[in-house]
Image (cartoon, helix red, strand yellow):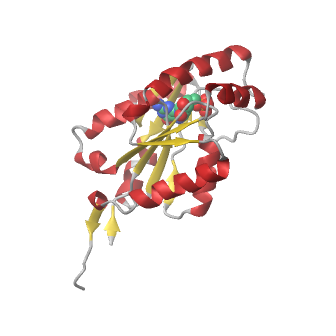
């Protein structure tokens, strides 16, 4: 059977555990890749250029934006983030599932594209990953000791706006327990892989 890949849009507040869940899921499944975004924010301790993000300057970002290299982009917490078209379209055509970790603005831009583009209408699946409570999110953000207090406050403020938009997503996953969250995310991907809308060719009679 030949199928088109799924474009899995994963959003959620910083500190919800998206990257951790995603890395573990990628170890368990084949035929799936994480789309590495470009960002103008500085790398955190331990982050690797070309693995976590492509860390670029605002000038480089603007050049790529003007070249129409981005599938979507947004300004989040004062920095720019963008998904490269090159990490998405060809892979989906080849039948590889792609996970995007993007904010709600990016998710809404892509949902907008699906209204007029049949290929993306078939590709997109959206999931919001949430921390169990606001208090727990604050504890996690402060505990990772990577951001200044004003950055943490801004991220917490954004989290309230993000969680209010949960109805915009198809699936909702609370990351209360990491092992369970990984099982649930893996099950979600296994289940969307069974959707008929992405089947391109299935020769039953051969
Ligand atoms: P962080 O700085 O914590 O890595 O990410 C901050 C926010 O930017 C997160 O909500 C993350 O999902 C979002 N983000 C990361 N890459 C992209 C991207 O390419 N596009 C958009 N729209 N948001 C992104």
Q: Quadrant of the C terminus?
A: bottom left
Q: Residue at x 37, y 31 (%)?
A: 108
Left of 30 or right of it: where is 89?
left
Q: Residue at x 61, y 16 (%)?
A: 154
Where does the image place residue 201, in percent across and percent down from the top left?
26, 69
Above/below status of 15 relative to 183: above
The tally of labels here is 0
Left of 48 or right of it: where is 14?
left
Above/below status of 147 relative to 100: above
When asked about the image quadrant of residue 134, the answer is top right
Q: Please state which of residues 10 and 172 is positioned toward the viewer in this rendering.
A: 172
Q: Residue at x 65, y 29 (%)?
A: 137
Q: Is residue 68 visible?
A: no
Q: Residue at x 35, y 57 (%)?
A: 93
Seen from this angle, which residue lies furthest top? 150
Q: Please state which of residues 198 and 52 is positioned toward the viewer in this rendering.
A: 198
Q: Ligand 1 is found in which quarter of the picture? A: top right
Where does the image place residue 127, in percent across and percent down from the top left?
45, 42
Q: Please state which of residues 190 and 50 is positioned toward the viewer in this rendering.
A: 190
Q: Quadrant of the N terminus?
A: bottom left
Where does the image place residue 24, in percent across and percent down from the top left?
63, 54
Where does the image place residue 125, in percent across and percent down from the top left?
38, 46
Q: Is residue 23 visible?
A: yes
């Amino acid at each position: 059977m030949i199928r088109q890949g799924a474009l899995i849009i994963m959003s959620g507040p910083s500190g919800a555990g998206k990257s951790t869940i995603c890395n573990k899921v990628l170890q368990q499944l084949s035929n799936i890749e994480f789309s590495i975004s470009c960002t103008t924010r500085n790398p955190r301790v331990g982050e690797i250029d070309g693995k976590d993000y492509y860390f670029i300057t605002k000038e480089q970002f603007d050049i790529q934006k003007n070249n129409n290299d981005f599938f979507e982009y947004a300004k989040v917490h004062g920095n720019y983030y963008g998904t490269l078209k090159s990490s998405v379209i060809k892979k989906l055509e080849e039948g590889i599932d792609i996970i995007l970790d993007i904010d709600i603005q990016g998710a809404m831009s892509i949902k907008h594209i699906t209204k007029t583009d049949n290929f993306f209408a078939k590709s997109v699946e959206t999931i919001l990953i949430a921390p169990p409570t606001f208090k727990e999110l604050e504890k996690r953000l402060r505990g990772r000791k990577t951001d200044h207090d004003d950055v943490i406050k801004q991220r917490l403020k954004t989290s309230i706006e993000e969680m209010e938009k949960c109805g915009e997503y198809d699936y909702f996953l609370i990351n209360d327990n990491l092992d369970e969250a990984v099982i649930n995310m893996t099950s979600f991907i296994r289940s969307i892989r069974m959707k008929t809308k992405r089947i391109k060719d299935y020769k039953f009679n051969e």
